[in-house]
Amino acid sequence: TMGHLLAFLLGLVFKATSVYGIPSCSADGQLAFYRFCNLTQVPQVPNTTTKLLLSFNYIRVVNATSFPLLDQLQFLELGTQNIPLTIEREAFRNLPNLLVLDIGNTKIQFLHTDAFQGLFNLVQLQLYYCHLSDSILKDGYFRNLSSLAILDLSRNEIENLQLHPSFGNLESLKSIDLSLNHISLICKRDLEVLQGKRFSLFNLASNNLYSKVSVNWKECMNPFKNMSFEILDVSSNGWTVDIVRDFCHAIQGTRISSLLLNYHIMGGGFGFHNLKEPDQDTFAALGMSSVIKMDISHGFIFSLNFHLFETLRELKVMNLSHNKVNKIANGAFYGLDNLQILNLSYNLLGELYQSDFAGLSKVAYIDLQRNHIGIIEKQTFKHLKNLQTLDLRDNAIKTVYFLPSVHTAFLSGNKLVHIEENINITAGFLDLAENRLANLNDLYILLQIPDLKFLILNKNRFSFCNQQYGPSKNHTLEQLYLSENMLQLIWEAGKCWDVFKRLSHLKILFLNNNYLNFLPPDVFSDLTALQILSLDGNKLISLSPGVLPENLRVLSLSQNHLLSPDPTVFASLSYLDITHNKYICECEARNFILWLNQTKVNMLGSPEDVYCTYPDSFSGVSLYSISTEGCDEEEALQFIHFSLFIFFTTTLTVFLTAVVTFTRFRGCCFLLWRKMFLTLALEYHPQGVKEDQHKYDAYLCFSSKDFEWVQNAFLNHLDSQYSPKNRFNLCFEERDFLPGEDHINNIRDAICNSKKTICIVTRHFLKDGWCIEAFNFAQSRYFSDLKDVLIMVVAGSLSQYQLMKYPPIRVFVQRQPYLKWPEDLQDVGWFLNKLSQRILNKKEEKKKSNNIPLQTVATIS
Ligand SMILES: *[C@@H]1O[C@H](CO)[C@@H](O)[C@H](O)[C@H]1NC(C)=O
Ligand SMILES: *[C@@H]1O[C@H](CO)[C@@H](O)[C@H](O)[C@H]1NC(C)=O
Ligand SMILES: *[C@@H]1O[C@H](CO)[C@@H](O)[C@H](O)[C@H]1NC(C)=O
Ligand SMILES: *[C@@H]1O[C@H](CO)[C@@H](O)[C@H](O)[C@H]1NC(C)=O
Ligand SMILES: *[C@@H]1O[C@H](CO)[C@@H](O)[C@H](O)[C@H]1NC(C)=O
Ligand SMILES: *[C@@H]1O[C@H](CO)[C@@H](O)[C@H](O)[C@H]1NC(C)=O
Ligand SMILES: *[C@@H]1O[C@H](CO)[C@@H](O)[C@H](O)[C@H]1NC(C)=O
Ligand SMILES: *[C@@H]1O[C@H](CO)[C@@H](O)[C@H](O)[C@H]1NC(C)=O
Ligand SMILES: *[C@@H]1O[C@H](CO)[C@@H](O)[C@H](O)[C@H]1NC(C)=O
Ligand SMILES: *[C@@H]1O[C@H](CO)[C@@H](O)[C@H](O)[C@H]1NC(C)=O
């Protein structure tokens, strides 16, 4: 499967990058890996170590002599000790080149104010969840850390931000994480030392900031005065509409590229009216902050009010997902002249109106997945000239008339039942998976869309095809996904075999899980660019040579019913998955087994998953562990000799007499018969021949090379002219065909004028074009007038695979069981009995006959 392929490629990547490839509690020169080693002090490691991992130990104290001089060390992980940790003065001074120090998730019992002194090169300091209090900021721990850029103090016990003056000298400081502390108020005076700084991240999330105290903003003033932020995270602070409005007002003018306000409690939610919805005032003051991205997801906003965002003219990305948005007021998005991405996913929108997105002249991406949208006004998206991607996954949309020309449209998980024929759009990528499309004609319609490159139709209900379009023109499609449909139902009805015609650019095709038990001839013949084909999870028994496109590189046939594949079919592939099939481990699989052992094709999946299913004694055994020794190429005819040996003596005389007799009289018989039926049969109107008008009980069709054996095995025991004890009036070429008549007419006559046609399928039969033709013709009566006239008897050691190579035989075998000439002579009587029943059985379709077993047929042994 593709899964195997991915796992395989990922495996390579993983092996190349795994850093912990050394045993625990040891060092390999660069990496010293000492996690979970019950250490109570720092171990001796080589002075070449660059990365030292000491988490999950019992180190109680580190002081200035704990670490030997390790001037190559860049990364030290000391956090997550199992006991509280004391860090003494200049504990890390022997690590002058340390870049990253991680002490997170450890209870720090005592921290000397000079603990970090000497770490001039330290870039990143992780002190999350260390039970630290206000003093960590107040007491100058970070003096002289002139390279420090990233300081993580999240999940501590900090309540007040009183910053030591030395923060003003931390020229490199870019990112402070103070989330998950208890900072309920920050005012201008608290952050004065940070003025003039630009932060890439300032994280104040989850502090109950401003929400647990009443703030006098006049006094407090702008805490972020003269600072600027790439990301200011004030999410999860329980902010209401009023808090947001006051905050925005207070920080007026502070530049913030990305403002995270998500996990708020603005809005009334669904069914409540007592809580305030944000309005025109709420975000108005942000207009001077040049906000480019704003996240107000995860809240309770029910209605997007009039001119809600009107001042946010520089905003490019807005995330309103996971609210309760159900109403979009007129002009709600007015002013968002530069908005490019609008995320309204996971809301409660039920219908979309033409006016909803008015004003979003530059919007390129609208995400509306996971709403309840059922109806969309036709022009809703069509006037958004820059729209490239429209995501409407998992809604309740029934038709696609509203679809604008976009590059990418996601419509999976809706309720589409058909595609409008006049859908006049261009699109590059269409995801229509998990809908209710049932008529494969929809695919022909979609293939009229110019420029389409990716089309996903997995998990629909394609099961019939009222084809109204021909195959597309030279189409641009490159990837087509049709997994988990019911293409078998379509193709077995003989419909739409040309569905992949002219897709000369197609590179990837997924047809897995479609119940396929055959592939229509030439179905892939135009796919000259196809590289990856998945046929997983179907019911394919064999693949005929030539069915695969020549440039195919990756083929997945896992979980099919392959019995004994012809290895030449796979020869030109690079990757192949043939796990979990129903291999027959008999001699006819010899070539396949030998091929498996030495092929250069990369096999995906584990060798254990390529196992035998038959015979029972080999069930579950890997094909890779089976020996083909002792398999003789021509063992096939053995049984015939064996049978002949038994019959020979008893039947020789009868046979000779019979041949002489009937050769003499055949002319008369046939002239008579010809007069009666020939005209009828030539034009072949099967309805014209009534049951009781049949001249013969059965036409016995076999290769003339098998004549002697057939005579011994069948004619002697069934045909009434061979013995008066026999009750059937049989027809066969050697006796009953009209000399001089066209052979094919003879065959048709024989079939039309017999109640049944028995094909004795042997190796000779398969090599005889006339026999196959006769088989095909008899079979066709089943399809043309539902008369099941064909009985197939397989004799000799023909494998299912050899049979399946012949399309008419394949069709028969998939339709019903066939009889097999018994290997054990004791069973011959039983077999002939069963065959007789089949001849007598006047089964119309679906009617089960309960004929009594024939007593008159002689048993042989
Ligand atoms: C650490 O100590 C525990 C408990 O005594 C023991 O089970 C474990 O094997 C020790 N681990 C190492 C790496 O010595
Ligand atoms: C590392 O230690 C070895 C001896 O163990 C010594 O020869 C070498 O000079 C030391 N390298 C440095 C850079 O200190
Ligand atoms: C560091 O601690 C060890 C024991 O943990 C002690 O023997 C040593 O004297 C201490 N060194 C300093 C400089 O305090
Ligand atoms: C560290 O900072 C202190 C005061 O902030 C200063 O007196 C001292 O000189 C600095 N040390 C170094 C090595 O720069
Ligand atoms: C911002 O802060 C810097 C450094 O503290 C200072 O030089 C500058 O004058 C301040 N600008 C304003 C507008 O306050
Ligand atoms: C909000 O949407 C933006 C863009 O649409 C996305 O990058 C971001 O991850 C989303 N935030 C959350 C919390 O989902
Ligand atoms: C929109 O937000 C949802 C949920 O937060 C997220 O999964 C999705 O990726 C976002 N869409 C875009 C386009 O970023
Ligand atoms: C298809 O749409 C284009 C413009 O988008 C228009 O010019 C053309 O007439 C339309 N064709 C049909 C058949 O509606
Ligand atoms: C199909 O279109 C491509 C360009 O899109 C062109 O190069 C190629 O010759 C065309 N093939 C046929 C058979 O028209
Ligand atoms: C597979 O090939 C190896 C040598 O390449 C040979 O030793 C082994 O017997 C072969 N196995 C089978 C089942 O043919």
Image (spheres, grey):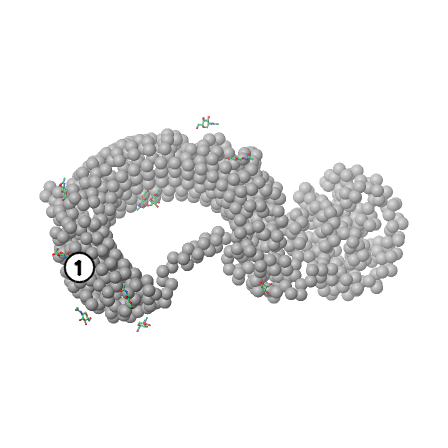
The quarter of the picture showing ligand 3: bottom left
- For the point 58% across and 59% down, the residue is 598
Q: In this view, does 241 lie to the left or right of 380?
A: left
Asked whether the viewer can see residue 787, the reply is: no
Instruction: Note whether 629 is above or below 386 in the view shown.
Output: below
Q: In this view, does 600 lie to the left or right of 756?
A: left
Residue 472, image x and y in percent?
54, 35
Residue 671, image x and y in percent?
86, 42
Instruction: Note whether 74 is above or below 774 in the view shown.
Output: below
Residue at image mark 1: 117
Q: Nearer the viewer, residue 174 or 329?
A: 174
Q: What element carries label 1?
A: loop
Number of dots carrying numbers: 1
- For the point 65% across and 52% down, the residue is 804
Instruction: Note whether 761 is above or below 525 in the view shown.
Output: below
Instruction: Note whether 658 is above or below 436 in the view shown.
Output: below
- For the point 51% across and 47% down, the residue is 532
Residue type at the position of mark 1: Gln
Asked whether the viewer can see residue 529, the reply is: yes
Instruction: Name which quarter of the figure residue 230 lies in.
Output: top left
Q: Nearer the viewer, residue 112 or 298?
A: 112
Q: In this view, does 136 lie to the left or right of 667?
A: left
| Mark 1 residue CB less than 8 A from any atom of ligand 4 | yes
- For the point 58% across and 60% down, the residue is 597
Residue 20, image x and y in percent?
36, 62
Q: Residues within 10 Å of mark 1 (few under 14, many from 20)?
A: some
Q: Specify the farthest residue to the left.
A: 219
Q: Quadrant of the C terminus?
A: bottom right
Residue 710, image x and y in percent?
78, 56
